[in-house]
Image: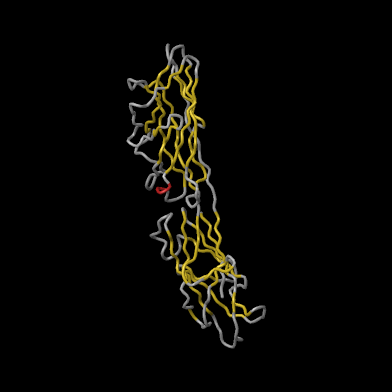
Amino acid sequence: MLRPFLTFVAASLAAPALAQTGAVQGTDCQLRINPAPASWIITGYDPFAEALPEGTFSVTFVNEGGAECRFMPLFDLSEPPFGLSKGTGKPVGYALLNLTDTQDVTPRSGRTQRISSQREVVLQPKESRSMLYKLVANPEDVRNAGIFTQRVTLEAQDRNFRSLMGTDIVLGVTVLPSVRIGLAGAYRMNNGQAVVKLGELKEGASPTQLQLHVRSTAEYDISVSSANSGRLRLGSSQWFVPYSVVIDNKSFNLNGVETLSSSSGSSRSARSQNSLDILPFQFIIGDVSNRRAGVYSDVLSVSVTAR
């Protein structure tokens, strides 16, 4: 019996932050907009975890003038089309919510849609007001790892649609290189390990049907190692049967640790990220002549690392 042990490894990327804070000078209302932080980036999102890609941010509006300011905060796309992007592939959709006023301010059509029930923000001279916003990325649009961003302009508009002030904010989500691994086929679980029965040992390919399932947001490497250096062992004796494994048409020499890169296998050319890769997993039995009868086994460790 053969008992593969499956693990996974994840890494993170760091996200850049860049934005502006601006003010306008005038004889009456003088408004300043201070977003905090300067860039609204959802960091460290793992698409295979249960958490949603979301983050909460704030903006402080300050009236530095000597007269009252009345306005509505609205978002405008600085760089259409709508969606968080890293330059290639399908953009990641998102929602932008004003938590203070319970309003959807997402600029889906290029600009926040003004509604009649929206309340004006009123600031007296030297008064300030902070508002909370939530950015939520659409997890169904996440296909691969990277930093997806979009630059928007937060404007303070009066009732006549005149812009009193505006400042740029970078919205974004950082998606981790992340991967999950599993087995399918003829195996059973025992104490957290997969047990594979190879049947009667005969030289050549084992008829056992097994598949390795990998889902990843990035290219990945599969590493395989054997506790007995590629030999099935009879109990604690010195009787062995040599064997090897073939994953996705790549043969592994189990005398050491061998690695398969996801871009090098025969079926990798048409691979799409964050999709399920089904890799054939086969056992090749070596010379079984003149071997003592009994159950021969080994512990095979399989790990996958996202790049």
Say above or below: 33 vs 232. Answer: above
Measuring from the top left, give residue 273's x and y in whole percent.
Answer: 42, 54
Query: Residue at image x 38%, y 60%?
Result: 270
Q: Quadrant of the N terminus?
A: bottom right
Expressed as whole percent of the image width and height from the top left, the position of residue 250 reads 48, 69
Q: Quadrant of residue 296?
A: bottom right
* Residue 177 drawn above or below residue 208: above
68 is higher (above) or lower (below) than 20? above
Q: Say whether residue 228 is left or right of residue 32.
A: right
**247 with respect to 141 (left or right):** right
Q: Nearer the viewer, residue 139 or 91?
A: 139
Colour style of the rendered protein structure:
secondary structure
Q: Residue 67 or 192: which is nearer the viewer?
A: 192
Quarter residue 190 falls in = bottom right
Q: Position of residue 234 (x, y in %)?
A: 62, 80
Please identify the residue farthest to the bottom as the structure is shown: 290
Q: How many marks?
A: 0
The x, y position of residue 95, in whole percent, is 40, 39
